[in-house]
Amino acid sequence: MHRYEEALESFRKGLAIMQGITPQAPSNTQWQADLATSFYKVGETLSMLRRYDEALEMSKKNVQLLAQLAQGDEVNSYWQHELSESYGVLGHALKDIGRVDDAVEAYRKALTVIDKLVASEPSNATWTSTLVTILFYLADVGDNPRANLTRGLELLRRLTADGKLPAYQKTWEQGFEQLLARLPPGVEKERY
């Protein structure tokens, strides 16, 4: 715990600096992005310390900033991808405090954003990998688990066939198969 407390102190100092300078140049998108990253780092550290309510507030601020950046430059795939991942982090924060329905909503927003990116460039392994992750998150909270796991498994198989499956997802194909096998027939709402 001690190291997380040290990290939190450091990240909060960085956040304070960014909060101080960002208003001086509100159109500076790099500073806005750095501020969003600062909220993310503080939130993730708070989550590691099991301070979930505080982590949720940081995650909301991160998403709010990234949503503004993404709306301001809708063709910027970097902002769109970051927004998708941030909605996923928000979903985790909501799930951690027991707000599963709100977590599903956040994960669905992540899915909407990442689906558009993958549709625009299906060969992008990073985006496809993020899509697989979001599909798993949705299945995990009981949102159409069979459909989401099946789609995720198909994407994993495509990445494997193309030789683009990230190393950290090498065991996921088998994991998705096992999760699908555990689902009773006809069940579409079940948490793992």
Image (tube, rainbow, N blue to C red):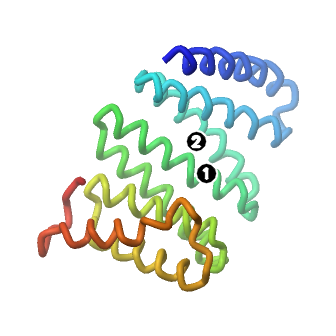
The tag earlier along the polypeptide, 1 or 2, is 2
Using the image, tell me which numbered label, if any, was put on residue 65: none
**What x and y, as percent, mark residue 17?**
78, 19
Residue situated in front as seen by the camera: 109 or 123: 123
Rendered image quadrant of residue 151: bottom left
Residue 176 showing in the rendered view: yes
Residue at 76% from the left image edge and 56% from the top image edge: 73
Report the side of 84 relative to 179 (left or right): right
**What x and y, as percent, mark residue 55?**
48, 27
Q: Which residue is mark 2?
A: 63
**What x and y, as percent, mark residue 52?**
41, 26
Rendered image quadrant of residue 179: bottom left
Q: Amino acid at mark 1?
A: Leu
> Dots 1 and 2: beta carbons under 8 Å?
yes
> Distance from label 1 to label 2 (Cα)?
7 Å
Residue furthest bottom as drawn:
161
Q: Dot 2, how many residues are within 10 Å of its Cα: few (below 14), some (14-19), or many (20+)?
A: many
Q: Dot 1, how many residues are within 10 Å of its Cα: few (below 14), some (14-19), or many (20+)?
A: many
| Element carrying mark 1 | helix
Rendered image quadrant of residue 173: bottom left
| Element carrying mark 2 | helix
Q: Amino acid at mark 2?
A: Val
Q: Which residue is mark 1?
A: 83
Residue at 42% from the left image edge and 42% from the top image edge: 92
**What x and y, as percent, mark residue 43?**
54, 29
Residue at 36% from the left image edge and 71% from the top image edge: 174
Report the side of 2 relative to 6 (left or right): left
Report the side of 20 relative to 189 (left or right): right
Residue 148 showing in the rendered view: no
| Relative to 155, residue 183 above or below | above
| Relative to 67, residue 142 above or below | below
